[in-house]
Amino acid sequence: MKHRARGRVDDSLSVVAEQDRLLVEIFKGWDATAPGPDVDGSGTFVRSAYERGTYGKLLIEHAALRVAAKRDVARVLRDTGSAALAEELVRHLPEVCRLLDLLDEMARGVNAMGVAASTEFARAVDELGAVLRADLDTEQAQLLPRVQVALGEHRGDLHSSHWARYHAPTHPAPSGRWYNRVPLLVRIQARYDELRGFPRATSTPMADPKVAGPIDDGS
């Protein structure tokens, strides 16, 4: 079984748990920076929009990583006789991927302020939130422990978090497509999406490093 330097398990199941936690924080940040009047003219509205756009960019990147990690966990579950649990784990992924595609297309080549100003982007985030939020609140306590038990010794067959990060396109192909089963093609697509998605959530000065930094280093 794979381990991080500090002794924590380092695999795609740990990535799912981590992304659940981070996405809760990202949604909170997105909600907290909703547009409001700049009453005193101090630039509060501009700062809020700057942060909101960064949260929007982060949402795409981290939701995509969660998709990649869940697909890897489901792969091992299916291979080891837990197909029903695998389907429960990925039941929302087709809709998540559809919305990620929309968000990726709207944010591609757009800076944080532009993302925050897009009502279409906000509408798609609301749709994604409607799909994800309930799972994010309960998955770590309810579903993931069952998955861990079902994997048993086969948890060692999961890929590492490093692998998941390099196989997480922000414009994911729908489940069931043959090229999802070719890791090299998925990695190429993930790199292509990364390049065309510039500026990213961590691309200063086009995004807010005070928002992106703590999220991306897992703190």
Image: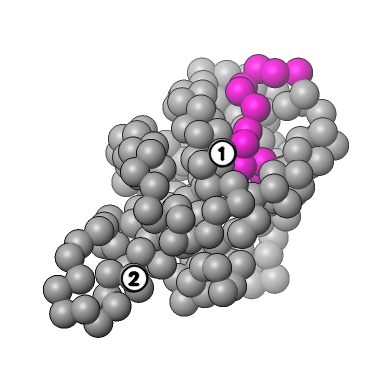
Residue 66: % across, % down = 55, 44
Residue 183: % across, % down = 80, 35
Region rendered in magenta: 168-178
Give yes or no for residue 172 being in the magenta stretch.
Answer: yes
Residue 24: % across, % down = 37, 54
Which residue in the protein does label 2 denote?
46
Considering the numbered disc 2 on the image, is that residue within a helix, a strand or a loop?
helix
Most foreground residue, 204 or 19: 204
Name the residue: 55% across, 53% down: 110
Disc number for residue 18: none
Image quadrant in which you'd find residue 127: top left
Q: How many marks?
A: 2
Location of residue 183 with respect to 36 vertically, above or below: above
Give yes or no for residue 169 being in the magenta stretch.
Answer: yes
Determine the residue located farthest toward the right in the rendered image: 184
Which residue in the protein does label 1 denote?
105
Q: Does residue 69 appear in this view?
A: no
Name the residue: 45% across, 53% down: 115
Relative to 106, 10 lies left or right: right
Q: Earlier in the sequence, mark 1 or mark 2?
A: 2
- Residue type (three-letter) at the residue carrying disc 1: Glu
Residue 40: % across, % down = 16, 80
